[in-house]
Image (spheres, rainbow, N blue to C red):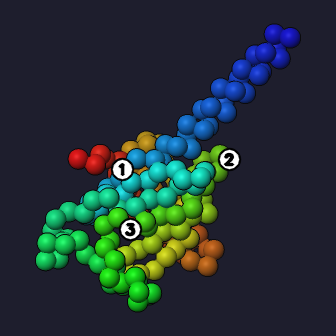
Amino acid sequence: MKKFLFLLALGLYLNVASAQNSKSITGIWWNEEKTSKIEVVEQNGKYVGKIVYMIPEKYENGQPPKDTKNPEESLQNRSILGLQILDGLTFNLDEKQWEEGHIYDPKSGKTYDCYAWFDGSTDKLYLKGYVVGIKWLGKSTEWTRTSLN
């Protein structure tokens, strides 16, 4: 009976620990160029990210830049500030990474399949966007944890 209770307690602990690990992607992140901050949050079990800050040097006529490269003409006049660029990531406990997501690149107007992971520290988030399901055909980027201020 003691063995059973110990295993039950250990199982509950590991389950809580892995749930906390899946949420370690949440927070505010500088993009690689340190021109934008992206807030990653959990929504309905998936992780999404939107641009919540842009450095003033990127503003045009005092306004945040528009999504002019978007292939949908009706979206080309929307602001990049507030734009959701990361969508649908789910945590894979076995791989210890977030998978099956999409990332939008406002510089090109293209959307890529995406996955993300940590390499040791949870202060650096690595993301890779790729096409046609072939991960080695992609491009990686590194985001750095920060705060909104």
Against 60, residue 119 (above or below) is above
How far separated are the C-alphas under marks 1 and 2?
Answer: 25 Å
32 displayed left or right of 74: left
Give me the disc on residue 28.
Answer: 1
How far separated are the C-alphas under marks 1 and 3?
Answer: 14 Å
Please state which of residues 144 and 45 is positioned toward the viewer in this rendering.
45
34 displayed left or right of 28: left
Please state which of residues 144 and 135 is positioned toward the viewer in this rendering.
144
| Closer to viewer: mark 3 or mark 2 | 3
How far separated are the C-alphas under marks 3 and 2?
Answer: 31 Å
Q: Which residue is mark 2?
A: 94
Q: Residue at x 43, y 67 (%)?
A: 85
Against 144, residue 8 (above or below) is above
Estimate the x, y position of residue 29 in percent, counting from the top left: 35, 53
**Amino acid type, mark 1:** Ile
Q: Earlier in the sequence, mark 1 or mark 2?
A: 1
From the image, which quarter does the N terminus lie in?
top right
Q: Residue at x 60, y 32 (%)?
A: 17
